[in-house]
Image (cartoon, rainbow, N blue to C red):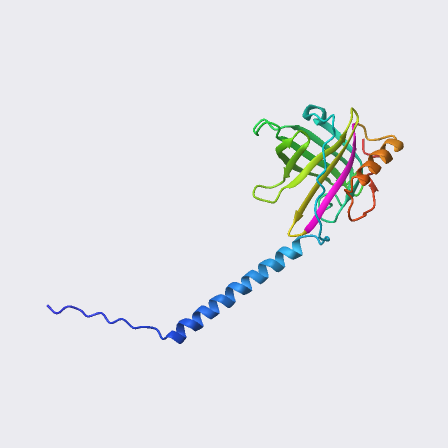
Amino acid sequence: MREKSTVKFKRPLNFTLRVTEKMNRYTMLITVVALAVMAALVPVTSAGQCVDAKPGANFTNERYYGLWYEIGKIQTAGGAFFEKDCVCTNIAIKADPSGNEGDAIVTNSCRKNTPQGKYLNATAKLIQETVPGIWQESFFPFAPTQTYTIIYIGDDYAVEYDCESVFGLLNYCIHILSRKPTQDPGLTMKLLQGSLDMGLNSEKLDYVQTLQEGCW
């Protein structure tokens, strides 16, 4: 029997170069589109770095656990992504039984626009507690985390500072908290001024009081 002969054809070099060039342009186009979509989704803030804030000297995890009411806040656009329309805001913190030592679960809850508005909530995990009072806050697996620090704490008050800087874009929040829906105005101003003295409000944003009246 005669063996079948196989003839191999070589593609011209210029054909290969054209195909490669088209693939490179296609890859570049996909990359540009992806970056444009990401930029559209990320709130615009100015460049900057988070402050290396220290936790309150008398902080313990057990002291922070439980329910807190937000008295007021300072937030960048990205920091306010969840809370921008919130009133009646409160947070609940508890130890995470399925996590590592020091891990916690924080549930942020509020009403949209009015005390009778839609109930909103977001749950995050506090992980990687390097020292008592400093965690990384994670809302979604594989998503960037943000530093979460309790800079002041007492029996009935606390101040929480969270911050992230991704690709030079700075987002941060300062939350004045109370064990009750109300707080002595003098104490609020003292906690706020202490936060400002630490340089946490680098964008010089306005302090916004959180509506708690009529919520409970």
Which image quadrant is residue 149 in?
Answer: top right
Which image quadrant is residue 80 in?
Answer: top right
**Is 133 situated left or right of 142 in this image?**
right
Q: Residue at x 84, y 38 (%)?
A: 193
Q: Main secondary structure of the magenta part?
A: strand
**Is 103 situated left or right of 153 in this image?**
left
Q: Residue at x 19, y 70 (%)?
A: 5
Question: Whole-percent x and y of residue 31?
Answer: 55, 60
Question: Whole-percent x and y of residue 54?
Answer: 72, 34
Total tally of numbered discs in the picture: 0
Q: Residue at x 49, y 66 (%)?
A: 24
Query: Which quarter of the figure is the C terminus placed in?
Result: top right
Figure check: 61 above or below 111? above
Quick one: 116 or 188, which is closer to the camera? Answer: 188
Tell whether position 178 is magenta.
Answer: yes
Which image quadrant is residue 32 in?
Answer: bottom right
- Which span of residues is magenta-colored? 169-179
Extreme left residue here? 1
Quick one: 122 or 141, which is closer to the camera? Answer: 141
Extreme right residue here? 186
Figure check: 61 above or below 42? above
Tell whether position 35 is magenta.
Answer: no
Question: Whole-percent x and y of residue 210?
Answer: 82, 39
Question: Whole-percent x and y of residue 140?
Answer: 60, 41
